[in-house]
Amino acid sequence: MIKEDSIRLIFGLKLKQLRLAKKINFQDLSKASGISVSYLNEIEKGKKYPKAEKIAALAEYFQVDYDKLVSLQLEAELKPIGELIHSNLLHELPLEIFGLDPASLLELLSAAPAKVGAFISTLIQITRNFDMNVGQFYLATLKSYQEMYDNYFPDIEADVVRFREKYIKGNLGPYSPQLLAGILRNIYHYEIDEEAIADEPDLNSLRSYVKIVEGKKKLFINRKLTERQLNFIFAREIAFNFMDLQNRPTTSTWVEIRSFEEVLNNFKASYFASALMIHEESLVEDAKAFFEATSFDPQTLKKWVDKYNVTTEMLLQRLTNVLPKHLGMKELFFLRFERPQSKERFRLTKELHLGGQQSPHGNELQQHYCRKWISLKLINQAVAIEDDLQILSAGQLSTYYQGDKSYLLLTLAPPKNQLTGSYSSISIGILLDRSTKKHIQFLKDSRIPKEKVGVTCEACPANDCPVRQVPAIKIELEQQQIKVRQALSKLK
């Protein structure tokens, strides 16, 4: 069913196109139709829908059929914009966080409908070619939201402070699953079940599930979870309740994405959980001491995991909150790679880029990521060790063949995932510009591995790479095109 505000937006869009086609302003249209200038303006912005007699007056003036004017069908050049309105995407996305509302966005889109329509159609075609569904679009939008605010949200940080003061008397942690589960049971009246998921073979890879019926809340958790994974599940569940986030997912991993609000609230709860487990000021002091040291100790990251009793991903995600805000390291990336135990095939399953599109980044063409990255090396090392308890930690100074950008990579590889059997690594990369080089004192430490790296084998110009997986077909194609252009330039 089309929402009422979508109907208003479509009518306003049609009226605007009629007015612009006739090259008249609001004042002239007001005199001709008997409708006030302010009301016409509200109609075009999609805020008002006129009564039948006013629609009849407009139809008569523009010499269009009444039924055609109120129809939800748009002219050919506006059809892509109409598809956008009909999809309800404008109402799913909280445009206000980007300083927009549906009406103002449509006003921008309708300024040059033919060009914008082609652009929207192109975007739709691209998403289809890359098999991007609405859920993936929502997740991509969330990343843009995080990047716009340098992934630091003071209102959530303040909520964490209020929660600590109210329910745990300012205790800064570390916390145990027993403490957090007790809060869920005693304050938010949860029942916690550790057996039911394990009894369902199809749910073996699921970490948790929440069922809420008539105000009664039951949290099902997988008994294979580690203590640190339980901490995140419980802390995130506390966040949904304390922050009163109603529209939320019920599973710990996405099974179905129903709205952007659900995606946004899941992010807020996850951010709250990490901020609760890892005290902001404490981590800032730890990070300052780490970067001010003249020698590099990669084991420091593992020590922080133990200190805060958190997962490797929680720790490095939390660093993406505090490093831009408190240490001025605004250009960095976060990456999570995974590979199955059975074969050396790597997938980039999570990424975040702050301060611009840093390298490396995901590729939808499934090209082969550079095997010189410490992120991939550490996963292979974890596979070789086959230790179900050991966390691996390492660092690397990476300089790219193309562009010459250099990054400090800090990487953690947790033990094998007991639910999926896969291995992973979590990395943050800090761009080494003039500012960050001043703040990181151990960059000259000879113990830090240094590598000249590419992004993917297909696009890497290194001719003598010992770990190349496939030929540099993208480079070869570009070189062939250069030769063709040079040959063409010789023709008289």
Image: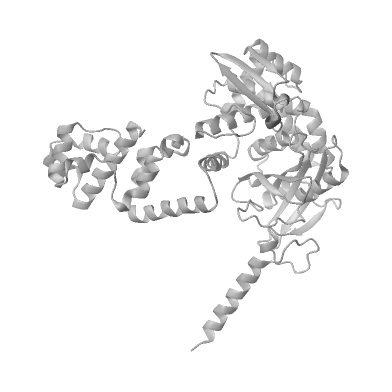
Q: Residue at x 37, y 49 (%)?
A: 80
**Residue nearest the observer in this picture, 317 or 58:** 58
Residue 172 in the image: state x and y as whole percent: 73, 21
Image quadrant assignment for residue 144 = top right
Residue 484 in view (yes/no): yes
Horizontal side of 465 relative to 275 (left or right) equals right
Residue 69 in the image: state x and y as whole percent: 21, 42
Q: Residue furthest top?
A: 186
**Residue nearest the observer in this picture, 439 or 397:** 397
Q: Residue at x 65, y 20 (%)?
A: 219
Looking at the rendered image, the quarter that the N terminus falls into is: top left
Residue 169 in the image: state x and y as whole percent: 69, 13
Q: Is residue 459 above or below residue 70?
A: below
Residue 370 in the image: state x and y as whole percent: 73, 57
**Residue nearest the observer in this picture, 195 or 471:** 195
Colour style of the rendered protein structure: one colour
Residue 168 in view (yes/no): no
Q: Is residue 491 above or below residue 35?
A: below
Image quadrant assignment for residue 100 = top left
**Residue nearest the observer in this picture, 285 or 306:** 306
Q: Residue at x 54, y 32 (%)?
A: 264
Image quadrant assignment for residue 316 = top right
Q: Residue at x 63, y 73 (%)?
A: 479
